[in-house]
Image: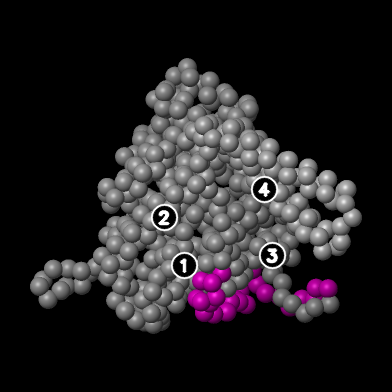
Amino acid sequence: MIAIYARQSVERENSVSIETQIYYCKAVLKPDEKLKDIKIYKDQGASGSNTERAGFKEMIKDIKNGSVEKVITYKLDRISRSLNDFVGILQVFKENGVEFVSSQEAFDTSSVYGDLILKMLIVFAEFERTSIINRVKDAYSKRSEIGLYMGGKRQYGFSLKDDFINGIQTKTLVPNEKELKQVIYIFNYYSDPNTSLRSLLHSLEINNIKPLNGSLWTASKLSAIIKNPVYVKADFNVYNYYQNKGVKIVNDIKTFNGTYGARIYGKTTHNKALNDWSDMKLVLCQHEGVINPDIWLKCQLKLDKNRKLGRSVSNKSSFVSGKITCALCGSLMTTVKSKKSDGSFRRYFICPQKSHKKICSGCDLTIYADDLENFIDKCIYEKLYQFKTEYKENSYLTKSNLENIKSYLKHIEEQQNKLSDIILMSHVNKELLSALNQKALSLSLEKNKILNTLNQLKTKKQPVLNFTQLCQKWLEADFNQKKAVCQILIYRIIIFKDGTCEIIWNI
Ligand SMILES: [Zn+2]
């Protein structure tokens, strides 16, 4: 039996819905697994900080009596947010021969590099994400900002009508029933998991459904229609969908009541290529939507998935493929082979907007793949090494020096007492008082620090990881392992005009 586990958290107000999680989990089922029994375990509104969850407990029971062969979740943190719990649960899986797959993190205990990835994820769980990611991202978006939103086009299925709303002259959308009928056909057809844009094109053709403006359907026209929130009866699941993409939503979630369509806008040009929606805004419109939110969301998830697959399998020639980004236009750079004078080939990265369309001036230098890979290779090694040293600093405490710490704490408490005696007993002038207060403050800070370390020491179990091994594993990693590690560690590698590069880390 295959187990799918979904948990909607209480930690975050607008978290991914159970239904969406299950959809993603089913998407990673292998063909033969689709024929097997699938049991879905759900915990609605449960916290991931402990394992006291009804659905979860039921699953563990089934695992222990041997009826489960594989567990699939949307993300690792659905299982647990606590590292200790997580490692313990994985142990239970292992003891009972249960495979474990996360649909979003390229994590699969049955794959050859699952072990390496797991170790790394555990490392990551130990360190908080820092604000540095956002800082670098900001710098990047400023550098590559290249254009303005081109708006005002009529949306297929609607006519534009001049209107006054709250005294402001504007245009509203009026339904064009004949066109909308086609739009509904498109959504219904594509929401079926067994269809594709290509089969949709074919189906429109054999049913003689042509665009009413006299043009022809193309895959990009269809995907533009499917992506457009103007057609959906936007409800809170649609709100969540955009919220999870980082889109800023203008209206309150309460207004997403499944009636009105929505419009998405913003500086899209480079963000679309990066699949980064953080500059985008979503606003509810005045017109009523026509597509049921369930159907609309099914279509989005399918498009999103195809986009992701398209990118990851499109280029197997470099372990950093899919990460290298042109700073000028935001496009993902592709590898090209060139023949050297001795007849051998050399790979280099080039901006596709430069090579095909000549609309980007690209990088001034040739970015040879070997050079860049060597550089990234070194950076990743250093990153892993940094984890190792940071970890050492964090865990210098051992039981043998527990006594030392306790006596230091006592020493500080004595100093604090003395200090308050001085302040209370003697007539001191303002300057001295402020100096004494300073001292008192630094003592109490020091004390807090020690108390924290003591608490950590008491609660933290000794790590199961060997960090030296992690660095070593990187040195020995093969192409697929390197690619997988790259996927997790690196968000983007930005190549600037002068040939310099900047790595944006995920952690
Ligand atoms: Zn470019």
The numbered disc on residue 273 is: 1
State the CA–CA distance, disc 4 to disc 2: 30 Å
State which tag comes first along the sequence, 1 or 3.
Answer: 1
The amino acid sitting under disc 1 is Ala
Image vertical order of residue 427 relative to residue 456, above or below: below
Viewer-nearest of discs 3 and 4: 4
The numbered disc on residue 383 is: 2
Q: Which secondary structure, mark 2?
A: helix
Question: For the residue with label 3, is its CB less than 8 Å from the closest atom of ligand 1?
Answer: no
Task: Write down the residue under mark 4.
Answer: 446
Task: Write down the residue under mark 3.
Answer: 283
The amino acid sitting under disc 4 is Glu
Q: Residue furthest front?
A: 426
The amino acid sitting under disc 3 is Val
For the point 54% across and 72% down, which residue is it? 139
**Crowd band around label 3 with a 10 angstrom C-alpha radius: few (<14), some (14–19), many (20+):** some
Nearer to me, 379 or 230: 379
State which tag comes first along the sequence, 1 or 2.
Answer: 1
Percent x, y for residue 241?
60, 53
